[in-house]
Amino acid sequence: MTSSTNQFLKPITTKVNDAGNLEIGGCDLVELADKYGTPLYVIDEKTLRAVCNDYKNAFAKYPKTRMMYASKALCVCAISKILSEEGFGFDTVSAGEIYTVYKAGVDMSNVLFNGNNKSYDELSLALDLGVGRISVDNFLELALLNEIAHSKNKTVDILLRITPGIECHTHEYIQTGHLDSKFGFDLTQIDDAVELVLNEYKNLKIHGLHAHIGSQIFETSIYPDEIEILVRELARLDEKFGLKLDEINIGGGIGVKYTEKDVPPSIYDIGSIVIQKLEEAVKKYNVDYPTLFLEPGRSIISTSGVTLYTVGSSKQVPHGKKYVAVDGGMADNPRPSMYQAEYVAEVANKKDNAEMEKVTVAGRFCESGDVLIPEIELPKLDEGDILCVYNTGAYNYSMASNYNKVSKPAMVLVNNSQSDIIINRETLDDLIANEVIPDRLAK
């Protein structure tokens, strides 16, 4: 079995340098913290490109594959530019994500727009910017999209998103493929949707079916189940309507290694399983080989990212835990509070310190639930130490907030001993830039 980058806990360039500090991308993390401040998101370019190559190599035997990065994991112009260079398209879920990849210079024909409640303005923007595929989620959207397309005298290429009825064993909130879901057409609704497109909505053209079965998936058996359902539906729709669909989108969802106990599948194993099943299903149902869309997000960006914090105050509860506070927390990484997500951390500046202690790493925000890592063994921490939390590339910045009116962190890209700002740290003026005091209150 060939290992892949999503199975690593740390960026592939992580090491301890001659100064005894942690280093990523050839950059000393203590120096990065000093130069850019903390909290600080750090993205390792080599790790990001390595996982892209894993995906391309894993699916190379099926030439009709289109990789679509799930932008919701982290949508930043610089990251979009890198992924576009690597040959990836983009699965977007909002006008903001569409506009971001557009401003990054992405070929918009390689962009797909997904989501369960797209607005008129968002759909209109997608058509104006030439988004290549719209994944339609419900009957209201079918009607609305056809109306907009008709007003613009355009034909829109669409996929129908379906709920395949497959349940994966992840957190309840990140399961999107089971029957009781807000996403997609139920299998019993597909025919009605197809009939509407064929008979009434003349400005829409169906190319295929789209399903997504969840996120942070460690199981491998569910992908063949999903492919079986999608290819079977292609054959059934051809037989009933004479509709020859030639695309299937199986979503993404491959897991990553947040802690040592996590054992995500190799991207190469998933590629082999998917391709083998697809070949079997095509022969079984006597359909042409469809174009295969994949939507990896977390598994693309997560491992390349770390977050740096500066240690502040500490508190020893009598006969209880020792809390050590850092200068970030649930506003820059809400996942521990939302999902009970687990992370691993190291001290960037004390790799040779042998005196260890068990602590709970707490955030600086005014919530008792603002705990980043409960009970972790670390070298004894002092004020000013730099803590590096691993695997924070996905769903940290993208879910960040300004809770407690705190500025969002900066983000830097590191590669070959060079660091570059790709998101500026918010200023106090940024925090109030959109606020207005009415004239009647200004008197």
Image: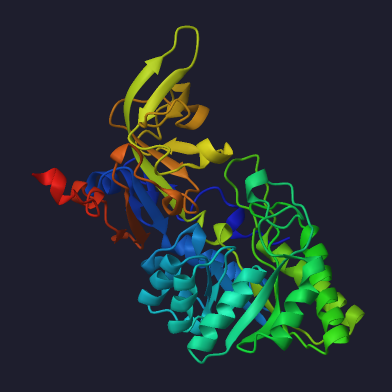
Residue 10 pos. (x, y %): 51, 49
Residue 406 pos. (x, y %): 29, 41
**Which one is nearer the viewer's eye here, 440 or 17?**
440
Is 152 positioned to the left or the right of 381 in the image?
Answer: right
Task: Examine the rendered structure and indicate whether residue 79 appears above or below residue 341.
Answer: below
Q: Quadrant of residue 423?
A: bottom left
Task: Examine the rendered structure and indicate whether residue 183 appears above or below residue 58.
Answer: above
Q: Residue furthest left?
A: 443
Task: Examine the rendered structure and indicate whether residue 191 appears above or below residue 25.
Answer: below
Q: Quadrant of residue 313?
A: top left
- At 61% across and 40% down in the image, what residue appears? 260
**Which one is nearer the viewer's eye here, 157 or 312?**
157
Evaluate whether residue 164 shows in this view.
yes
Residue 388 pos. (x, y %): 41, 41
Task: Examine the rendered structure and indicate whether residue 158 appears above or below residue 341.
Answer: below
**Which one is nearer the viewer's eye here, 384 or 70?**
70
